[in-house]
C-alpha cells in the first residue's frame, strides 16, 4: 500500500511519518486485505492540529476521516478511530460487494465546472443569460451498483454522488435528503 503523508504549513518529521505508516497499516490490515493508497494530511487550525485521512480500497470505495486535537498524534489517533469505526460498520458490506464483483471498479473522467452566482435582481439579467465559469476541474465517475454508491457516499461523508449504474450503464445520482434518508435518481431512457 502506498501511504502519502503531507503537512500543510507544518513540518511532518520522520517519527510522525513512521507512526502514521505503522498505525494505518495495522488498522487497514484488520479490515481490508487490499488497500491501494492512503493519503494523510496534517494542518494547523488556530491552536489545534487537524488530521485528514483518506484510504482508497481495491473495491473502488474511498473512506475518509478527519479529527481535531491539541496534539498532532492525538488528532491522527482520533481520525484513525473514526475510520476504524466506519470500516468496522461496513466490513460485512465490503466483503459482500467485493465477493460479488468480478471486475475492478471502472472510473471515467468527467469535466466539472463551478459557475458564479449572480446576487443581483432578476430585472438586471440580460436576455441571453450565460453564466461565468470560475473554476474547471476533472471528476471521476465510477461504475458502481446502487448499494456500492450509497456506501461510497456514506464513507466519504458526501451529500451527493454521481455514478454510472452497473445494471444498465446510465448515469445515476444518489443524494442525502433533508429528512436524513437517501434519494436515488435513475433517469429512464423512455422517449
Image (cartoon, rainbow, N blue to C red):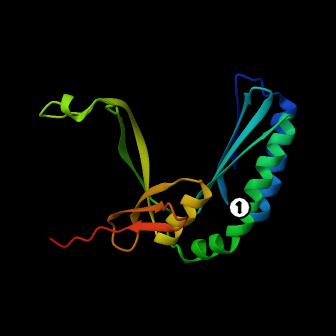
Which quadrant of the figure has residue 121? top left
Q: Position of residue 45 (x, y in %)?
A: 73, 29
| Residue name at image x 63 percent, y 70 percent | 94
Q: Which residue in the protein does label 1 denote?
A: 86
Q: Position of residue 146 (x, y in %)?
A: 46, 70
Which quadrant of the figure has residue 32? bottom right
Which quadrant of the figure has residue 72? top right
**Which element is circle 1 on?**
helix
Q: Is residue 23 left or right of residue 114?
A: right
Q: Position of residue 168 (x, y in %)?
A: 33, 72
Q: Is residue 55 left or right of residue 117?
A: right
159 shown above or below 74? below
| Residue name at image x 26 percent, y 71 percent | 188
Q: Is residue 60 visible?
A: no
Q: Is residue 5 visible?
A: yes
Q: Is residue 164 left or right of residue 92?
A: left
Amino acid at each position: 500500500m502506498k501511504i502519502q503523508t503531507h503537512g500543510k504549513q507544518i513540518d511532518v518529521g520522520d517519527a510522525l511519518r513512521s507512526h502514521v505508516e505503522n498505525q494505518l497499516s495495522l488498522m487497514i490490515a484488520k479490515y481490508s486485505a487490499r488497500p491501494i493508497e492512503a493519503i494523510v494530511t496534517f494542518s494547523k487550525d488556530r491552536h489545534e492540529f487537524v488530521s485528514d485521512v483518506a484510504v482508497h480500497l481495491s473495491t473502488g470505495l474511498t473512506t475518509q476521516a478527519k479529527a481535531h486535537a491539541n496534539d498532532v498524534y492525538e488528532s491522527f489517533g482520533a481520525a484513525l478511530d473514526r475510520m476504524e469505526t466506519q470500516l468496522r460498520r461496513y466490513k460485512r458490506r465490503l466483503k459482500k460487494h467485493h465477493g460479488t464483483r468480478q471486475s475492478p471498479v471502472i472510473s471515467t473522467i468527467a469535466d466539472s465546472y463551478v459557475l458564479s452566482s449572480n446576487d443581483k435582481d432578476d430585472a438586471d439579467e440580460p436576455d441571453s443569460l450565460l453564466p461565468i465559469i470560475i473554476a474547471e476541474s476533472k471528476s471521476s465517475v465510477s461504475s458502481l451498483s446502487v448499494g456500492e454508491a450509497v456506501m461510497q457516499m456514506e464513507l466519504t461523508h458526501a451529500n451527493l454522488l454521481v455514478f454510472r449504474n452497473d445494471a444498465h450503464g446510465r448515469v445515476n445520482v444518489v443524494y442525502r435528503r433533508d429528512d436524513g434518508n437517501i434519494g436515488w435518481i435513475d433517469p429512464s431512457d423512455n422517449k
